[in-house]
Amino acid sequence: MTTSKTRSVVSLCFETHRDFSRNLERLIELLSKTPEDAIVVAPEVCLSGFAYDRFDEAVDFTPFAIDSLIKHLNDRLLIFTAITKEEEGIVNTAYALHQGGILHRQNKAKLFTLGAEHEYFTPGEEGDIIAFTFEGIKIGILICFELRFKTLWQKLEGCDIITISAQWGKLRSEHFVTLTNALAVMNQCYVIASDAANEDTSAMSGIITPFGGELRNHGAELLISHFESQTVASMRRYLNVGIE
């Protein structure tokens, strides 16, 4: 008999300011309000914004911020994205931090051309969009615009949880809601979506269950729910579409 895994899950929704230190302090403050066993998802580039005019500063801030965040995690898993520099150029990197280190990282592969991201960032490799395992829970990450690509949904088929870190445009807010709900139902998994609460973003963070049950932040910076592996297993057993 398999024991069901449970874990607190948290979706954050907060404003990104030009002051990097202020953003880091706010993220640490919100972390302190979450259960110590939580899987916490924060918005895309929540520490700096896209900072196209301050890339060097953002790149230097990222390792400092990671070191600071790790000290406040306890048993939490934190997923967010930050601006980093690699040999190929500047990249938007998703990090999964846990207990003193980086458990997983991947670079944003699908850049949002309407926002001119391709003029500043180097895209990551789609092949690097793979699931990782955290305490027996299979987790996948999509970054903002990547949510629109059905081929990436298929790459993460079989995940127990898919997280979305985003800076999703307010004019397309309903798309964010529709796509995150559909991803949970189609892949029969939990989706934890985190969008920024800026003037031009949707602020429609939320947590969706494999059965399509939807919780949204509705302006709150913090939304707390829970993950149950048995819920995933039940959905896949009773509505068997071939996901294992």
Image (tube, helix red, strand yellow):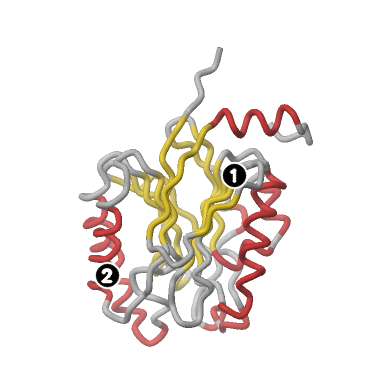
Vertical placement of 84 versus 118: above or below?
above
Q: Which mark is residue 236?
A: none
Classify mark 2: helix, strand or loop: helix
Going from N to C along the chain, the mark reached first, 2 or 1, is 2
Image x and y of residue 58, in percent: 32, 75
Left or right: 239, with 3 as reference point? right
**Residues at marks 2 and 1, CA–CA distance in whole angstroms:** 35 Å
Q: Nearer the viewer, mark 2 or mark 1?
A: 1
Image x and y of residue 49, in percent: 40, 76
Picture quadrant where residue 65 is located: bottom left
Image x and y of residue 13, in percent: 42, 64
Left or right: 142, with 87 as reference point? right
Classify mark 1: helix, strand or loop: loop
- Residue where numbered disc 1 is placed: 209
* Disc 2 residue crowd, few under 14, some 14–19, many 20+, Cα 10 Å: some
In the displayed orientation, state which residue is furthest to the bottom.
53
Image x and y of residue 12, in percent: 41, 59
Left or right: 154, with 79 as reference point? right
Which residue type does callout 1 highlight? Thr
Q: Measuring 24% from the left and 73% from the top, which residue is drawn there?
A: 22
Q: Quadrant of the C terminus?
A: top right
Q: Measuring 45% from the left and 58% from the top, which residue is drawn there?
A: 94
Which residue type does callout 2 highlight? Phe
Q: Which mark is residue 61?
A: 2
